[in-house]
Amino acid sequence: MTDETAKPFLYLVVCAAGIAAGVGKLVTAAQERGWEVGIIATPVAMNGFFDTAEAEARTGRPVRSAWRRPADPRPFPPPDAVAVAPATFNTVNKWAAGLADTLAVGTLCEALGLGVPIAVLPCVADALSAHPAYQESLARLRGLGVRFGDPYAGEPEADGGRPEFAWTRALDLLERG
């Protein structure tokens, strides 16, 4: 942060998982904890996985998914931290391999290279999470200082289903440093 009076700026990367519809919970929690928030979504996530108009209203900024042209102004200041929630199998694997083919993954690659703190809440099916490439990607990113949290840790729902997605765990990971 360059301006002492400015709030820290959080880049929130949103991937295409059904749970993404609840991303407003993380935006609100981040704002309550003193963060400004800018959302960068994967192209597929922009196709109805969350309400982009609501996200823009909450943040006061456009949801980004495409690269800007060189002459366009920067829509967000540089990040003080990055949260990836929900993080999908595809995004984690592309990021670990350095395949910056979308703005979302390119942003993650750049943030990692700059040493920006990054917290990740994966949303990956059990069968995919057991895949060797995914396990290698997690190990690689953890080894580079990326903080992963289990958004489903806790008591199961009354019907035996997964606990509610713990959106604020990403902020806890960032604040613990």
Image: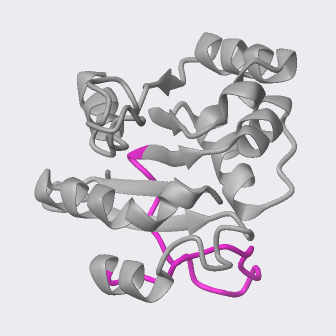
Indicate whether 128 appears above or below 109: above
Quadrant of the rendered image containing residue 16: bottom right
* Colour convention: one colour
Residue 93 at x, y = what percent?
Answer: 79, 34
Indicate whether 98 appears above or below 126: below
Decide whether residue 129 is among the magenta residues.
Answer: no
Indicate whether 106 appears above or below 89: below
User: What residue do we see at 75% from left, 18% from top?
Assistant: 130
Q: Quadrant of the C terminus?
A: top left
Q: Which residues are magenta?
A: 60-81
Q: Between residue 14 and residue 109, name the one nearer to us.
A: 14
User: What residue do we see at 15% from left, 55% from top?
Assistant: 34
Residue 171 at x, y = what percent?
Answer: 29, 39
User: What residue do we see at 33% from left, 46% from top?
Assistant: 167
User: What residue do we see at 50% from left, 60% from top?
Assistant: 20
Left/right of residue 87 with respect to residue 97 in the rendered view: left
